[in-house]
Image (tube, rainbow, N blue to C red):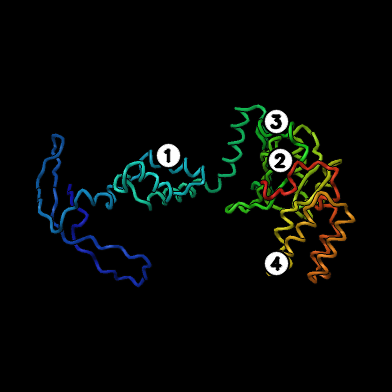
Amino acid sequence: MKISKGKEGETMEDQSKVIRTRKRLVTRVGCKARMILKYRKEGGYIVQTFYEGHAHPLYTPGCKKFQIEGRKLNILHKKMIIDNSKLNIGPVTTFRLMKEYFGGYGNVGASKEDFKNFQRDLKTYIKGSDAQMFIDNFKMKKLLWSAFFYDFEVDEDDCLSRALWADPICRRNYALFGDMVSFDTTYSTNRYNMIFGPFTGVDHHKRCITFAVAFIAKEDTTSFEWVFRTFLKSMGDNELICLITDQEPAMKIAIQNVFQNAEHRFCMWHIMKKMPDKIGRIICQDTEFLSKICACVWSLEIEPSEFEDKWKKVLIEFHLEGHDWLRQLFEMRHMWIPAYFRDLFMGGIMRTTSRS
């Protein structure tokens, strides 16, 4: 049996016509250092040949961290990467944290690329099974908390299409503060292209609280109806008083089909945020226009007729009376202008997107 170093022999010239996009450092320099062992019939080995001379400088202890032999992920590294990934902390940041823990990059015992490669391999390993792991996590929580609620549906390809869950604290919060609820679907996951929709509200300290969370693959009426019916089911069929959402047409139809007595209102913050894109950023940078339109929209002290007069005056003053988007907003003013539902307690959640 022959034992030799990695620098033994000479590097062969590449005779292939394949164009390599990644160049590797040539390490074979004809080093003769080797040890040959001979097997004994009685058992064991004896050293037959030993040559100690090297044709290259030996590595110093400081270079150990650059060698493959000195860069191996142990169980501590792997657990750190997995635990941090659950907190949305990437492998590069994890590597830097490990450097701080061990007092230097040379003491980590692995490279940044090793950390990145492990997380890549981990994602590849769980790809295709992550939805099942997602549901299995719900089942485990249900065993721990009997009051934990979850439900889900799959499509014709057995892919997760809808899911909703609420823990006991969320359900308790709804029982206490669930009169006014916002449902915000302006979020989307970056990997699965599913819409993230939290049901949120406020407590008596004006702090944001969560009632339930949903994932949906499509923003259609069927998906929204399933979400709203499942939400009511999770809350013991106790219907809310008012639901604040964005202007999604499919959601509006679903709310009418599911909720019998609940009021539906649009998020003011979401509407006002779209104004620069709809009417132009230049006019929205005009402080006089902003002060007048905000005084018209946000005021809780004016009557509906007073709002209509102020709205028309602002549009005439800034030559916007023929703008289609503003005309549509005025036609549905009863859905988002506080002057039209001053008698309805909103709990400070008309600005749903900014809250959630």
Amino acid carrying mark 1 in the image: Lys
Q: Residue 172 got which mark? A: 3
Q: Residue 286 got which mark? A: 4
Amino acid carrying mark 4 in the image: Asp
Q: Position of residue 295 (x, y in %)?
A: 77, 56
- Spatial CA span between label 3 and label 4: 46 Å
Q: Which residue is mark 1?
A: 79
> Can you see residue 118?
yes
State the residue in front, 317 or 127.
317
Q: Who's the residue at 33% across and 70% down the image?
A: 16
Q: Who's the residue at 38% across and 38% down the image?
A: 76
Q: Earlier in the sequence, mark 4 or mark 2?
A: 2
Q: Which residue is mark 2?
A: 201
Q: Position of residue 74 (x, y in %)?
A: 35, 41
Neighbourhood count class around disc 3 (C-alpha, 10 Å): few under 14, some 14–19, many 20 upward: some
Q: Earlier in the sequence, mark 2 or mark 1?
A: 1
